[in-house]
């Protein structure tokens, strides 16, 4: 068997085309463009690339974005003050703090300062809680993108054995909760899992987000499984690879995401979706100016 490769770029392009329409419809209906504020502290080169991609993606679909760049020695209080101001700015629908923050910052306090109704990354405790009880306002972008890929391929989640390798707050844990919400039977593995293969071999859906090249090899995969490789690793020779032995796993799985070109393009795309959804929610709840017709009545 050679797995069908899930084309994240194509799915992302289709979702972005829909985003463009939703932005246009908000402009036509309410005369307002959705807005995203991206806060970056310090000059981490990887973060710079991610922020550039996010700003570019916003521009492509018509979202207004602003990048707020602070030097690494800025005080946490100053950044929080700005986050709070953005929280009450009626033209800002999404606030994102690019991680990592400098070591002197307390991430929990900074993320907690984001207005939960604009927390498009879904990392605020309120939104994490929403995810736990199955009432998510902003699903975290990477696992949201994975769910979108599974849905696009019509892969049955309910009743499936799903195994998530990696238990971080931004990928593994929310991924497990989303799969559980869709009625999969979920196991979560991490670096202290004793026999990883014992779990992965049971998976109908295997999501790998560990950041370890070649962690998952063909013998660890159930014949015909769906394998979603979230990992992004740069090898010493410069090549970008996921967490799976791509060639080997491809011969065993029925679906597989490539790296690059699988989950990666979906992550930024779901940020656009969350920002637009936020604007739609706010604007549909806002008291509207009466139309000329209503004034005549
Ligand atoms: P973290 O480093 O925060 O978490 C890694 C997780 O993997 C931890 O839970 C860790 O276990 C677990 N782990 C590490 N080694 C092993 C192992 N040998 N066996 C089993 N589990 C292991 O990473 P992130 O969650 O932020 O990211 C994971 C990967 O996904 C990275 O490669 C990252 O670049 C990529 N990524 C890709 C995105 C995309 O858009 N495609 C977006 C975000 C991340 P423990 O908890 O015990 O330490």
Image (cartoon, rainbow, N blue to C red):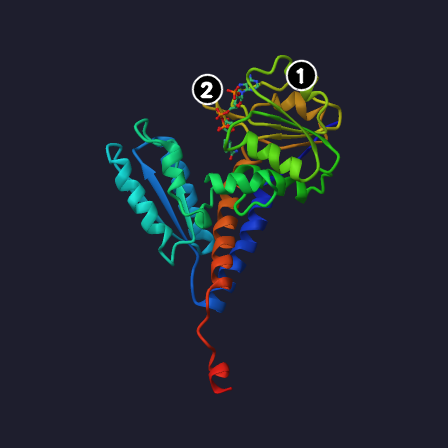
Task: Establish whether ligand 1 lies closer than 8 Å to the Cβ of label 1.
Answer: no
Q: Is residue 231 positioned above or below 283 on the image?
A: above
**Quick one: which residue is furthest to the top in this view?**
194
Q: Residue at x 51, y 58 (%)?
A: 280
Q: Is residue 266 visible?
A: no
Q: Quadrant of residue 217?
A: top right
Where 60 sits versus 193, above or below? below
Q: Which residue is mark 1?
A: 197
Q: Please tell me which residue is depicted at 58% across the width and 38% down the height of the picture.
A: 132
User: The N terminus is located in which quarter?
Assistant: top right
Marks 1/2 in contact by CB < 8 Å: the verdict is no
Could you give the CA–CA distance between mark 1 and mark 2, rounded to whole angstroms? 28 Å
Q: Is mark 2 within 8 Å of ligand 1?
A: no
- Whole-percent x, y for residue 223 in the image: 75, 24
Q: Which residue is mark 2?
A: 237
- Say left or right for 55 vs 255: left
Camera-side residue: 274 or 80? 80
Query: Which is nearer the eye, 284 or 218?
Result: 284
Describe the element under mark 2 as helix, strand or loop: loop
Tell me: residue 62, above or below residue 255: below
Q: Can you give x and y, in whole percent of width and height, for residue 107 in the image? A: 38, 33
- Label 1 sits on a secondary structure element that is helix
In depth, the one of 112 and 37 nearer the eye is: 112
Image mark count: 2
Q: Residues within 10 Å of mark 2 (few under 14, many from 20)?
A: few
Crowdedness near tag 1: few (<14), some (14–19) or many (≥20) residues, C-alpha within 10 Å: some
Decide: is 150 above or below 189: below
N-terminal of the pair, mark 1 or mark 2, is 1
Q: Is residue 42 visible?
A: yes
State the residue at coordinates (64%, 13%): 195
């Amino acid at each position: 068997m050679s797995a069908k490769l899930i084309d994240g770029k194509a799915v992302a392009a289709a979702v972005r085309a829909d985003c463009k329409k939703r932005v246009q419809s908000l402009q036509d209906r309410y005369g307002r463009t959705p807005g995203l504020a991206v806060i970056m502290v310090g000059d981490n080169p990887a973060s710079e690339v991610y922020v550039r991609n996010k700003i570019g993606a916003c521009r492509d679909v018509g979202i207004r974005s602003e990048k707020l760049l602070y030097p690494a020695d800025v005080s946490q209080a100053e950044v929080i003050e700005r986050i709070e101001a953005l929280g009450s700015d009626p033209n800002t629908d999404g606030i994102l703090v690019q991680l990592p923050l400098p070591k002197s910052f307390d991430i929990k306090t900074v993320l907690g300062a984001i207005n939960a109704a604009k927390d498009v990354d879904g990392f605020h405790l309120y939104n994490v809680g929403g995810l736990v009880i199955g009432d998510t306002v902003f699903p975290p972008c990477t696992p949201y993108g994975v769910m979108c890929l599974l849905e696009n391929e019509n892969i049955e989640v309910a009743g499936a054995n799903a195994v998530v390798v990696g238990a971080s707050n931004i990928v593994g844990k929310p991924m497990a909760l989303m799969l559980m919400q869709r009625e999969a039977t979920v196991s979560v593995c991490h670096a202290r899992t004793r026999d990883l293969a014992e779990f992965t071999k049971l998976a109908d859906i295997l999501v790998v987000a560990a950041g370890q090249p070649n962690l998952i090899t063909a013998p660890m995969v159930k014949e015909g499984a769906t394998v979603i490789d979230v990992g992004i690793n740069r090898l010493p020779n410069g090549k970008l690879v996921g967490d799976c032995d791509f060639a080997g796993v491809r011969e065993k799985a029925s679906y597989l995401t490539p790296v690059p070109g699988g989950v990666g393009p979906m992550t930024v795309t779901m940020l656009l979706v969350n920002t637009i959804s936020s604007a739609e929610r706010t604007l549909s709840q806002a008291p509207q100016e009466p139309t000329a017709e209503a004034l005549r009545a």
